[in-house]
């Protein structure tokens, strides 16, 4: 509902646009405030508030507030935004998957290719110079720390020096040792973590390229936009991290890491990577039991670790 209203703003009259902006600033308050208070805060008349509700497709203010309350309060708090208390297992399967797929499609349509290209270029340059001491550091705390670990796992397989750090004190020490030519990738769902804000500032002072994966409009995103060597990869979604389990955000962050890994692998070139990855796969296969019905010399073309 909020996304539809946001998309409709350019077509609304200026007065109704002010009502829409008030709504988007705090939808829960909008659903409970009386029409006089809404009009005063929007600096419009009471009939303008009602006209806004009709312009965006509702019968009036009462109908609009009823639908709005249901929209902003949907889901089970601290579990998952899409589900309801009385959902059956089949409902949960559909809702959770649909929620994730919809978020990924929204990201596909909104992703800034220029920022992603800058991030891939910086990571590739650092990866090529890893033999000269250049390194890539992934920073995250809590759920984002898990994404940082996944990123380190993906990048070290490319033969570059990459580590993940989730402890706040270790992050400060790690960022202090960064140099120009290094990359610091900071992952945060809320963009408000003090530890990660401090790390971004330290990395900036040390001259490292800072790549930030977070929600646009957050403190961390604003800091990223204020420094020329920072790259912001915005991952926006309707999930309220203070109210719901950060499921969709983690999937989006993992997806962005996969995009960066793929881009860097292509830039580094298959001639350099293919022999290394083939040897890695071979060594991993030697640590597995043979599949049922297969001999010890099973198909060496398997590519799944």
Image (cartoon, grey):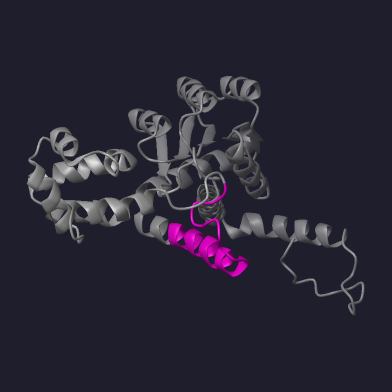
**Of residues 152 and 23, the one drawn nearer to the viewer in this rendering:** 23
Total labels: the figure holds 0
Residue lying at 20% horizontally and 46% vertically, measured from the top left: 20
The structure residue drawn at horizontal position 59% and vertical position 21%, both measured from the top left corner, is 172
Q: Report whether 109 appears left or right of 288.
A: left
Q: Quadrant of residue 240?
A: top left
Nearest the eye: 239 or 198: 239
The quarter of the image holding the C terminus is bottom right
Task: Name the residue located 71 percent from the left edge and 66 percent from the top edge.
Answer: 303
Q: Which x, y percent locates residue 12?
A: 12, 53
Residue 179 position, x and y percent, is 54, 25
The residue drawn where x is 52% and y is 35% is 186
> Split into 4 quadrants, where in the image is the N terminus?
bottom left
Where residue 106 sits: x, y (%)? Answer: 39, 58
Q: Which portion, as a residue range, is magenta?
A: 79-104
In this view of the protein, can residue 65 be seen by the observer?
yes
| Residue 122 rendering spot, x and y as whole percentages | 47, 40
Image position of 199 with respect to 51: above or below: above
| Residue 166 within the magenta-colored segment of the rendering | no
Viewed as shown, does residue 41 lie left or right of 149?
left
In the displayed structure image, the side of residue 152 where residue 69 appears, left or right: left
Q: Nearer the viewer, residue 59 or 273?
A: 59
Camera sees residue 111: no
Q: Quadrant of residue 93?
A: bottom right
Q: Is residue 83 highlighted in magenta?
A: yes
**Which residue extends farthest bottom?**
293
**Taking 163 as reference, is 80 above or below it?**
below
SS assignment for the magenta stretch, majority = helix
Q: Nearer the viewer, residue 138 or 39?
A: 39
């Amino acid at each position: 509902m909020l996304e539809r209203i946001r998309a409709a703003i350019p077509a609304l009259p200026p007065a109704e646009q002010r009502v829409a902006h008030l709504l988007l600033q705090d939808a829960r308050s909008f659903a409970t405030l009386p029409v006089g208070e809404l009009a005063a805060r929007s600096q419009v008349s009471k009939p303008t508030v009602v006209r806004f509700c009709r312009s965006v497709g509702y019968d009036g203010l009462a109908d609009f507030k009823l639908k709005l309350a249901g929209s902003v309060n949907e889901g089970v708090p601290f579990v998952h935004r899409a589900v309801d208390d009385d959902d059956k297992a089949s409902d949960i399967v559909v809702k959770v998957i649909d929620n994730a797929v919809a978020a990924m499609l929204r990201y596909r349509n909104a992703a800034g290719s220029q920022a992603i290209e800058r991030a891939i270029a910086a990571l590739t340059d650092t990866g090529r110079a890893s033999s000269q001491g250049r390194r890539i550091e992934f920073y995250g705390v809590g759920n984002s720390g898990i994404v940082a670990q996944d990123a380190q796992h993906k990048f070290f397989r490319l033969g570059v020096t990459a580590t993940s750090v989730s402890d706040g004190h270790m992050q400060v020490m790690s960022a202090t040792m960064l140099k120009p030519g290094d990359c610091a990738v900071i992952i945060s769902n809320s963009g408000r973590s003090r530890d990660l804000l401090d790390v971004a500032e330290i990395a900036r002072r040390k001259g490292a390229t800072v790549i930030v994966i977070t929600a646009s409009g957050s403190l961390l995103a604003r800091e990223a936009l204020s420094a020329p060597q920072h790259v912001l990869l915005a991952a926006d979604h309707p999930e309220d991290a203070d109210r719901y389990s950060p499921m969709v955000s983690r999937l989006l962050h993992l997806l962005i890491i996969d995009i960066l890994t793929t881009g860097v692998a292509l830039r580094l070139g298959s001639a350099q990577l293919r022999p290394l990855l083939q040897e890695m796969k071979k060594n991993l296969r030697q640590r597995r039991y043979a599949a049922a019905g297969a001999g010890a010399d099973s198909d060496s073309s398997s590519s799944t670790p």
